[in-house]
Amino acid sequence: MPEVLKAPLVVEFPFTRSLGPVQSAFLTGLRERVVLGVRTTDGRTLVPPVEYDPVTADELRDLVEVAPTGTVTTWAWNHEPRRAQPLTTPFAWVLVRLDGADTALLHALDAPGPDAVRTGMRVRIRWAAERTGAITDIACFEPYDGAPAEPGGHTGEFADPLTGIVAPARLDYTYSPGRAQSAYLAALSERRTVGERCPACRKVYVPPRGACPTCGVATSEQVEVGPRGTVTTFCIVNIKAKNLDIEVPYVYAHIALDGADLALHARIGGIPYDQVRMGLRVEPVWTPGARHPDHYRPTGEPDAAYDTYKELL
């Protein structure tokens, strides 16, 4: 049986957003160990606060402080905490309705085990030692058997309010290609590009997926394509990506390899970025030990006629 290929992959980007008056007050309040909700026109207090009433769609601006103590309304035990979760030891995810609020806040509860957690139990906020104006300023909740805390009546006005946040988004996963892509990757390691032909429409797809996206039938006939191809369309990249050692600006293009009926994407090099054009003929450039082309460069051939690649845009 052939080796099953797999590779760890990470998709990561920072999400930057500005804050309106409600979210600004809520996050700034957490920094100052104050929990703020917003009051609706019918008298409900929503925590976390929102800018518009989810029932009536009315704009909401009436901020009100609630207590740092509350009641668990429902929960689930987390046996194996993941990277960047609130606690590194097993804990409970809980919905907590803080005293003075009509809705529940999702966070972590530090408890010795699932037997110590129950719906209706009383809890309180454990504040983080260092607070920056984020939901992580609440380190977690902890069991509490005292009297409900009294809110201080804060109005939501702060001398130094937050105006924006940067929220990192990240997905870690393991990718395992199937039969078709494993063959494609094995051929690339030999500096060949192999696609698969559909038995119905006879189109050659590169990279292959094991089935024709048009006809929906399995593909198995391998066809070697390229190595040269034609730029069908492209974009100029002006923002440097994290952990990518390529100076900007550079060009990323869709390239229709000779013999293929689907364009693949790759970087264009060996030519000034402002001279890349549709129809440009290119060839792969390999670096020693690489399992795929580093980039594509012009071949020096005349540009391809538009009619030869217009169906591959």
Image (cartoon, rainbow, N blue to C red):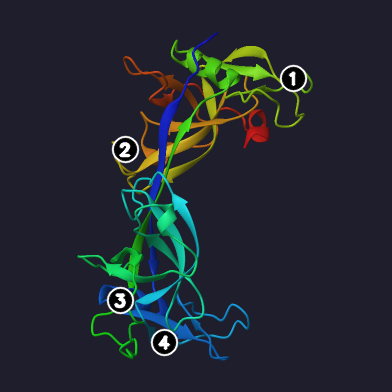
How busy is the neighbourhood of tag 1: few (under 14 within 10 Å), some, or many (20 plus)? few
Position of residue 39 measured from the top left corner of the image (x, y, whole percent): 49, 87
Residue 162 visible to an observer of this rendering: no
In the image, what residue occupies the spot 46% across and 21% down?
A: 283
Q: Nearer the viewer, mark 3 or mark 2?
A: 3
Residue 63 circle label: 4
According to the picture, the residue beneath numbered tag 3 turns out to be: 28
What is the three-letter code of the residue carrying label 4? Answer: Leu
Structural distance between the alpha carbons of marks 4 and 2: 44 Å
- Mark 1 falls on what kind of element? loop
Marks 3 and 2: CB-CB under 8 Å? Answer: no
Position of residue 192 measured from the top left corner of the image (x, y, whole percent): 49, 13
Q: Quadrant of the N terminus?
A: top right
What is the three-letter code of the residue carrying label 3? Answer: Thr
According to the picture, the residue beneath numbered tag 2 turns out to be: 244
Position of residue 204 measured from the top left corner of the image (x, y, whole percent): 66, 21
Q: Nearer the viewer, mark 4 or mark 1?
A: 4
According to the picture, the residue beneath numbered tag 1 turns out to be: 202
What is the three-letter code of the residue carrying label 1? Answer: Arg
Marks 4 and 1: CB-CB under 8 Å? Answer: no
Structural distance between the alpha carbons of marks 1 and 3: 61 Å
Residue 67: quarter of image = bottom left
